[in-house]
Amino acid sequence: MGTVHLNGHSLTLDDVIKVARCGYKVDLDPAAKAFVKRGASAVEEWVKEGKIVYGITTGFGDLASVTIPPEQSEILQENLLKSHASGVGEPFAEDVVRAIMLLRINTLIRGFSGITLETLSLLVDLLNNGIHPVIPSQGSVGASGDLCPLSHLALALLGLNDVFYRGQRMPAAEALEQACLKPVKLKPKEGLALNNGTAATTAIASLVLCDALNLSKVADIAGAMSLEALHGVPYAFDSRTHDLRPHFGQRSSASNIRRLIEGSEIIEAFRGSRVQDAYSLRCIPQVHGASRDALDFVRQKIDIEINSVTDNPLIFPADGEALSGGNFHAQPIALAMDFLGIAVAELACISERRVARLIDHKLSGLPAFLMENSGVNSGFMIPQYVCAALVSENKVLAHPSSVDSIPTSANQEDHVSMGAYAARKGRTILSNAQKVIAIELLAAAQALDFSSPLKPGKGVYGAYRLIRKKVPFLEEDVFMAPLIEEVMSLVESGEIIKAVEEEIGELDLGQISKP
């Protein structure tokens, strides 16, 4: 376990994963702390002067015209969090909560939010001590940022709300006491600094993107396995073809397939059987590659967002100004996550078509439903049904959230991004796609055994051997669900990628660097 150093400018997706999923702690850059102090001092001076500044000496949203006396400014901030913590639904998972906390800290350390170093340091202490606020997953419209979930997060700093600590759910005050920490009293602007921004949307998006990047590799592995199992021909993956249409993702996927099937006895034996295959095999580079390029676009947006200041108003101490803008609007991430959802749904869609070919003896030349004694045995008939059901769900979920704005706050906030749901449904689409591709891997491994003693390419064989350690060749019907779960675990954990890359080296992600 290590530490990620935060300065507000250099956070990476890899850092997010380390903190969210690997338990890394964080610390604050000493130089950045000076900017935090300067911003807090500016806010303090403005309150003393009676300066009219949105959210500091005024109400919020449609109440921006209501002036708040200086003596009530602290109450204003606490009331803001209490009233805005109105979320519903299942709590976010621990990795999401840790990512949210990290991104909020990385924004606040920039010093443009007016938060005090004391309050920011307590948020760091919560993260480093594993005190994770209970944050309901539903309630954000993605502007003014993720007000609802971030308010649930911020209340823990006051000793309010529940948290998860040392494996138990308990009141925040109790967890703070056990960790020898004290709740804070909010200063002017601090409530708004804590709950206004895109941290929740972007945290979910970051984790989903990381898993989607890995799945794009697994999709190539599964596609190559099906290609071999179906006695496909290699001509469609020739680099000369892809150099004439040089999309980065397409070329990287074609390169991966070539490496995965290199040295295949099966491919060599059936090389002259036909000149081309069905699209679900022949067009793997074009389809998988387009999804990979879409993920590259999403990564560009997330790389920017995780190092951005997204609350309102923004404090510019050097200029003596507080500017009310719209950086909290999550439209960049909403559009990106809608794009991710479409891209990942397509990985599942073409995978399901390959599963359908594997089980159809009229198309595959293999035993019906991949079972020698079909009829009394149904074999892989219903796993393909499951793929069809999941792909159909994804088609509905892939409808973009970002086109569905509903005005809020008495029409002061008359266009919102729905970015939080775009990110959440991206997670659901990804989970469905992981299941579909896991079923393809399971079916392709079964189908490969019918080509024995011929061996597949070195990369495909690495994946096949790992699957066979968990799941045997099926000679008759068995309880299938646990077998699918076994292969699912190999997909989710990245073990299937590791097994392949140990054989042929790191698979290519095109322009995208390793997550």
Image (tube, helix red, strand yellow):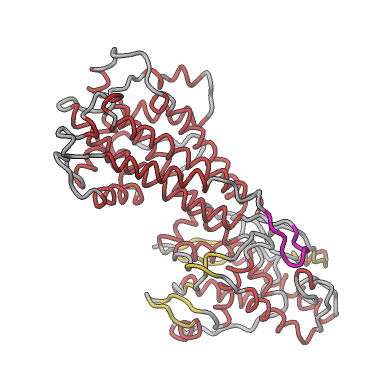
Side of 285 where 268 appears, left or right: left
Q: Is residue 406 magenta?
A: yes
Q: Is residue 472 magenta?
A: no
**Which quadrant of the figure has residue 408?**
bottom right
Residue 108 image position (x, y, % from top left)? 64, 66
Side of 36 where 410 appears, left or right: right
Q: What secondary structure is the stretch in magenta mostly built from? A: loop
Residue drawn 42% across and 34% down? 350
**Which quadrant of the figure has residue 319?**
bottom right
* Residue closer to the observer: 498 or 116: 498
Number of numbered labels in the structure image = 0
Residue 138 image position (x, y, % from top left)? 55, 65
Residue 18 image position (x, y, % from top left)? 44, 58
Residue drawn 80% across and 71% down? 64
Residue drawn 64% across and 50% down? 402
* Residue 252 visible (yes or no): yes
* Residue closer to the observer: 95 or 15: 95
Residue 277 image position (x, y, % from top left)? 37, 20
* Residue closer to the observer: 15 or 416: 416
Q: Which residues are magenta?
A: 405-414
Q: Is residue 53 above or below residue 262?
A: below
Q: Is residue 270 above or below residue 426?
A: above
Residue drawn 61% across and 69% down? 148
Q: Is residue 275 above or below residue 299?
A: above
* Residue 32 visible (yes or no): no
Q: Quadrant of the N terminus?
A: bottom left
Side of 164 where 81 appears, left or right: right
